[in-house]
Image (tube, rainbow, N blue to C red):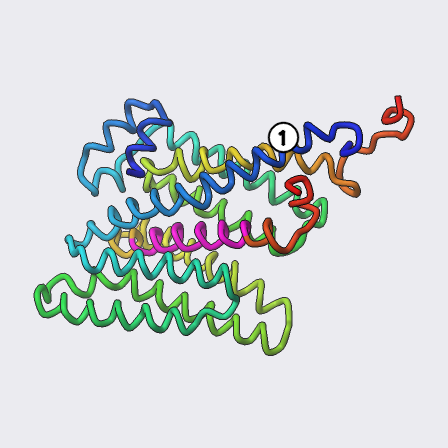
């Protein structure tokens, strides 16, 4: 079922081909698009790590970004490229909305003057 | 911003909640089940062990998400895996070492997390919490990479599978728990 979901949402012929292969191919075969996704994830986590340090989010988030970045790096071997679209792509969709949502926070969000609100 | 654009905030918050639950709580374990099976299939097929392994991962993740101290559940699952391991060794002694080495390291990491959890509760020191939730997982990542990129792909495969499914599921459950119960500001728009 999980692989069916992957093949539907990725629309990637290269990955869809891997779904029908044996487990060894699904684990170790190379996919150019997944490789690109892993590189993007690695860069994204590096950026997040810097943000964490600059804005003082705490050591827990720093460890989280290092651990996730390490996973993206090791996936370049290649490893589990069939599953990269979900774990490094689809699952991050919700992050987009939480990133927007934080703008509404009273302390860390965008400040809007009272005059704009009343108008 | 919240006073100026209340509907936008509600829509963004609701969309986040739906996507989070859909992808990170419901679909994640389903996909995780498949790559867990793919990983263990590298050592030879054993349906019972694969199911037990997945039960271990999901069970450990769920209990660690719901309660900080989950060692009793881990011990129970460990005994199940150990029993299945003994049976499988009887049937196929040649593959037993490689097949279970990754799972064994995973169990050791899980016990390490449990011990650190106990230390964290007793001493209430933040350093134990940090080590419990992230340091061991970072070690697992490094081990996976080192072993996987070396000659022994089997060990790396099992470790990475363990690490991905456990860490990710655990973080998802933690996120949901915090989202629902521990952060009133985050759920304000749902009320």
Q: Where B64 falls versus A88 (above or below)?
A: below
Farthest right residue in view: A115
Q: Is residue A107 left or right of residue B44?
A: right
Give the magenta part as a residue range: B158-176
Q: Where is residue B79 drawn, in percent x and y?
A: 28, 73
Instruction: Determine which residue is flagged by label 1.
Output: B11
Query: Which residue is depicted at the point 9% across and 64% down?
Result: B92
Query: Which residue is depicted at the point 45% across and 63% down?
Result: B63
In which quadrant will I find the N terminus of chain A?
A: top left
Farthest front residue in view: B191
Q: Where B48 falls versus A68 (above or below)?
A: below
Between A36 and B109, the one lying in front of the other is: B109
Q: Where is residue A102 drawn, in percent x and y?
A: 69, 38
Q: Where is residue B15 drawn, in percent x and y?
A: 57, 33
Question: Regarding mark 1 in the picture, which secondary structure is present there?
Answer: helix
Is residue B170 shown in magenta?
Answer: yes
């Amino acid at each position: 079922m999980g692989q069916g979901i992957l093949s539907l949402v990725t629309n990637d012929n290269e990955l869809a081909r891997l779904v029908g292969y044996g487990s060894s191919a699904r684990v170790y075969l190379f996919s150019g698009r997944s490789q690109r996704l892993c590189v993007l994830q690695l860069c994204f986590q590096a950026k997040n790590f810097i943000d964490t340090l600059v804005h003082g989010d705490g050591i827990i988030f720093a460890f989280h970004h290092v651990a996730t970045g390490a996973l993206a790096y090791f996936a370049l071997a290649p490893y589990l490229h069939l599953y990269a679209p979900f774990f490094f792509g689809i699952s991050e969709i919700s992050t987009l909305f939480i990133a927007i949502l934080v703008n509404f926070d009273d302390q860390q969000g965008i400040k809007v003057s009272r005059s704009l609100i009343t108008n | 911003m919240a006073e100026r654009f209340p509907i936008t905030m509600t829509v963004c918050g609701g969309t986040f909640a739906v996507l989070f639950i859909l992808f990170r709580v419901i679909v994640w374990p389903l996909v995780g089940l498949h790559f867990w099976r793919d990983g263990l299939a590298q050592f030879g097929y054993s349906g019972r062990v694969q199911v037990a392994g997945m039960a271990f991962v999901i069970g450990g993740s769920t209990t660690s998400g719901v309660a900080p101290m989950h060692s009793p559940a881990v011990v129970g699952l460990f005994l199940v895996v150990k029993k299945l391991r003994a049976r499988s060794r009887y049937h196929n002694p040649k593959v037993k070492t490689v097949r279970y080495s990754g799972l064994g390291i995973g169990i050791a990491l899980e016990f390490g997390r449990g011990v650190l959890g106990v230390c964290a509760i007793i001493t209430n020191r933040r350093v134990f919490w940090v080590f419990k939730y992230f340091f061991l997982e970072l070690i697992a990542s490094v081990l996976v990479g080192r072993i996987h990129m070396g000659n022994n792909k089997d060990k790396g495969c099992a470790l990475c599978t363990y690490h991905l499914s456990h860490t990710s599921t655990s973080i998802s459950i933690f996120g949901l728990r915090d989202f629902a119960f521990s952060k009133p500001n985050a759920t304000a728009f749902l009320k």
